[in-house]
Image (cartoon, rainbow, N blue to C red):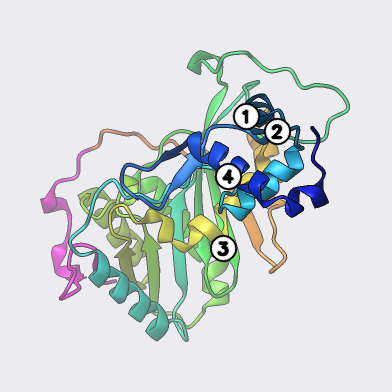
Amino acid sequence: MGVGGKNFVQHAELCELLSAFITEHRAGSPTDERVYWTHLKPREISQGFAERHTIVISNGLVKRQLQAMGYKYRKLSKQLATGQCADRQMQFKVIFTLIAVMSMQTPIMSMDCKKKERLGNLYRAGKCYTQQPIKVYDHDYHYLSEGSLVPHGIYDLQRNEAYLSIGTNHETAGFIVDNLAWWWESFGIHHYPQAGTILILCDAGGANSYRHHAFKKQMLRLADQTGIDFVICHYPPYASKHNPIEHRLFPHLHRAIEGVVFTSYQLVKKLMEKTTTSTGLKVHVRINDHYYPTGIKTTPQEVDFRRIQPHPTVPQLSYRICA
């Protein structure tokens, strides 16, 4: 027995039968009683339904019934935090207040390090137009790599411009602060000649962790070099997705470089410079091939805490580096 689209709507009992069949093959979230899913595809549902009720229906009808029942074709969503921070809400209030107050006269820069990549004939996710298949190694062993890529981004919220440094070895506090110095000397001082303070938004971990003395020491060096105060606001732990650079730059950057084999640093630079959006995003890229060693310890005695003014409410996550 075949059922067309119009006939299907006319027979309410078929809707009930199909709905019951789908319900039999659903599973639910152990933490949220409102969330259900089915592991069956529309083709499998139509085949199973035909075997059960000897009624042949199309995949399109199954899709419409799934939609009527509230099902959508989705991927997993990373929204469950793996931990909590006691100062989370207060730090967000501090960040929002500072952005609102300082945005009229102060540069507001969001920074973070994108996922590290490797040079060489290695597989990379994504697709691009080619005349012939591009063959790469069937395994991504480290020894097959020809070099490391450490993309560190700085995003200007007011100008909708990004500044990328492609590192060639390690992500360290020195690497991050050198990139900030490059932005200021090459762009910032010309865009904001009257700036006496710069607001920096960054994550709580990594080389710019609020716990690390090395980052504070390097920022004090930059303050000496530029004569500018830096207000540092770390997004609370487990909240890095709220950092503006995560959604204003990195997704567009990812699309610009996906599916391409990284054969040289110059190629990567060329691809990243093409990143743009309908809102006019501009991306400036440089290759930072300076070597940054790891494992260097920084003691509290090396940090001049007299020039670091902590925020009265969230002193660990927000503070001013004084020139």
Question: Can you tell which of label 2 and label 4 is closer to the viewer?
Answer: 4
**Does the magenta segment cover residue 234?**
no
Q: Are marks 1 and 3 in contact (CB under 8 Å)?
A: no
> Is residue 62 toward the left or the right of residue 130 in the image?
left
Q: Secondary structure at mark 1?
A: loop
Above or below, comparing residue 16 to residue 227 in the picture: above
Classed neighbour count for the residue bearing mark 3: other residues with Cα under 10 Å, few (<14), some (14–19), many (≥20): few
Residue 262 visible in the current orientation: no
- 256 to 264, vertically: above or below: below
Residue 229 image offset from top left, x and y in percent: 33, 73
SS for dot 3? helix
* Residue of label 4: 19
Which residue does the image show at 26% across and 69% down from the upper left? 89
Where residue 12 appears, x then y in whole percent? 67, 52
As for residue 311 lying within the magenta part, the answer is yes
| Tag 2 residue | 260
Residue type (three-letter) at the residue carrying disc 4: Ser
Taking depth in this image into account, of 152 and 84 the one nearest to the observer is 84
Q: How many marks?
A: 4
- Which of the marked residues, 1 or 3, is nearer the chain's N terminus? 1
Between marks 2 and 3 in the image, the one whose residue lies nearer the viewer: 2
Q: Amino acid at mark 2?
A: Val
Residue occupying the point 77% across, 37% down: 58
Q: Give me the residue at 57% from left, 22% from top.
A: 146
Label 4 SS: helix
Q: Looking at the picture, which amino acid does disc 3 mark?
A: Ser
- Magenta residues? 297-323
Pick whichever of labels 2 and 3 is earlier in the sequence: 3
